[in-house]
Image (cartoon, rainbow, N blue to C red):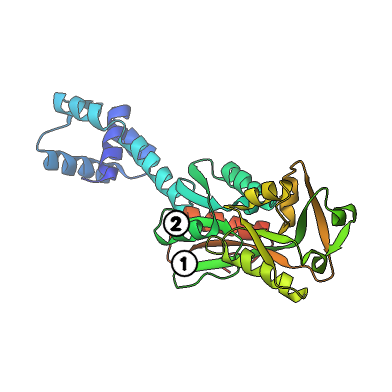
């Protein structure tokens, strides 16, 4: 039994006449009659009484009609559901991000635009440090992540650098250097440097340390902060200074001053990473929209 048999049966049942039913569905009356006979033979009982002016449902036909009346609508719904899934308009996606990435204006915008464009896709967001995000990708707890790394060791992870942002100094507001708009990094050679552990954010850690060395001094490591938000708070407590991506200046904390770096400015890169073997259409849509929003080539180009 095929769906076309159901459609033919319903046409005859609704029209009560083989000729009108054939005209309605666009086939000849003899082929329609043969298809109904084939259906009756498969079921093993007559579905219609053939009468002089048309066709009437038998009791078996009425019982059959009660069950199959919704089949064409169900089939259409199934087709539309499959088409939506094929376009990535349903499903789920789990996205991670670092605290500093969340301050980059483009990241919240990507989340907002994706939700508006794909309301049927459930998007779950998770904030964590870079090491946790990479681990989440590898063990498939996360589908895509925004983080401050330009490389990821090992195979299986694809990474796109989507933007580059200058770093700025974070100083206690009472520090003498905070009275100027720009500060040379070398002026802070005798100050304690506050950073997150290298294990949780190796790229940021290395770039800050390298910037200090390029400025002519080995940094004096001060208090270790669990995340960049804590770095800001520790600077406010006058425990030292630090460098953060410029978007973090949105985090206004009492006792903190953000200042531009005089001379060569280290760059913080924002990247999107995901598993290279992930074939989810929802993920491909998310990645493509993110790259387009950052004027990067789509993943299928």
Residue 52 visible in the displayed image: no
Q: Quadrant of the C terminus?
A: bottom right
Q: Quadrant of the N terminus?
A: top left
Residue 13 visible in the displayed image: yes
Residue that appears at 67% across and 56% down: 293
| Disc 2 + disc 1, Cβ < 8 Å | no
Question: In the figure, is residue 95 to the left or right of 248?
Answer: left
Mark closer to the observer (2, 1): 2
Decide which of 4, 205 is in the foreground and name it: 205
Question: In the figure, is residue 46 to the left or right of 130?
Answer: left
Question: In the figure, is residue 62 to the left or right of 98?
Answer: left
Q: Secondary structure at mark 1?
A: loop
Residue that appears at 32% across and 34% down: 11
Question: In the figure, is residue 67 to the left or right of 237?
Answer: left
Is residue 53 depicted above or below 264 in this figure? above
Question: x%, y% of residue 120?
Answer: 49, 41
Question: x%, y% of residue 282?
Answer: 48, 52
Question: x%, y% of residue 123?
Answer: 50, 44
Q: Which residue is mark 2?
A: 136
Question: x%, y% of residue 18?
Answer: 28, 34
Q: Residue furthest front?
A: 190
Q: CA distance from mark 2 to mark 1?
A: 14 Å
What is the crowding at mark 1: few (fewer than 14 residues within 10 Å), some, or many (at least 20)? few
Q: Secondary structure at mark 2?
A: helix
Residue that appears at 40% across and 57% down: 140
Decide which of 296, 199 is in the foreground and name it: 199
Q: Which residue is mark 1?
A: 276
Q: Earlier in the sequence, mark 2 or mark 1?
A: 2
What is the crowding at mark 2: few (fewer than 14 residues within 10 Å), some, or many (at least 20)? some
């Amino acid at each position: 039994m095929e769906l076309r048999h159901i459609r033919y049966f319903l046409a005859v049942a609704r029209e009560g006449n083989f000729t009108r039913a054939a005209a309605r569905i666009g086939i000849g009356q003899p082929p329609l009659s043969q298809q109904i006979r084939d259906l009756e033979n498969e079921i093993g009982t007559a579905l219609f009484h053939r009468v002089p002016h048309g066709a009437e449902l038998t009791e078996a036909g009425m019982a059959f009609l009660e069950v199959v009346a919704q089949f064409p609508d169900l089939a259409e719904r199934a087709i539309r559901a499959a088409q939506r899934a094929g376009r990535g308009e349903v499903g789920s996606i789990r996205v991670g991000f670092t605290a500093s990435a969340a301050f980059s204006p483009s990241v919240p915008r990507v989340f907002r635009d994706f939700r508006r464009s794909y309301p049927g896709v459930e998007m779950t967001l998770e904030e964590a440090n870079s090491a946790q995000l990479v681990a989440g990708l590898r063990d498939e707890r996360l589908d895509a992540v925004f983080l401050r790394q330009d490389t990821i060791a090992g195979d299986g992870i694809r990474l796109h650098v989507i933007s580059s942002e200058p770093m700025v100094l974070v100083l206690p507001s009472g520090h003498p250097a905070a009275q100027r708009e720009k500060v040379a990094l070398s002026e802070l050679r005798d100050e304690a440097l506050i950073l997150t552990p290298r294990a949780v954010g190796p790229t940021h850690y290395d770039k800050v340390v390298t910037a200090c060395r390029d400025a002519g001094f080995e940094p004096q490591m001060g208090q270790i902060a669990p995340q960049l938000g804590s770095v800001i708070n520790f600077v406010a407590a006058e425990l030292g200074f630090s460098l953060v991506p410029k978007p973090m200046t949105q985090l206004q904390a009492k006792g903190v001053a953000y200042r531009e770096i005089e001379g060569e400015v280290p760059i913080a890169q924002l990247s999107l990473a995901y598993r290279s073997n992930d074939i989810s259409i929802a993920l491909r849509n998310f990645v493509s929209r993110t790259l387009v929003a950052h004027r990067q080539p789509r993943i299928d180009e």
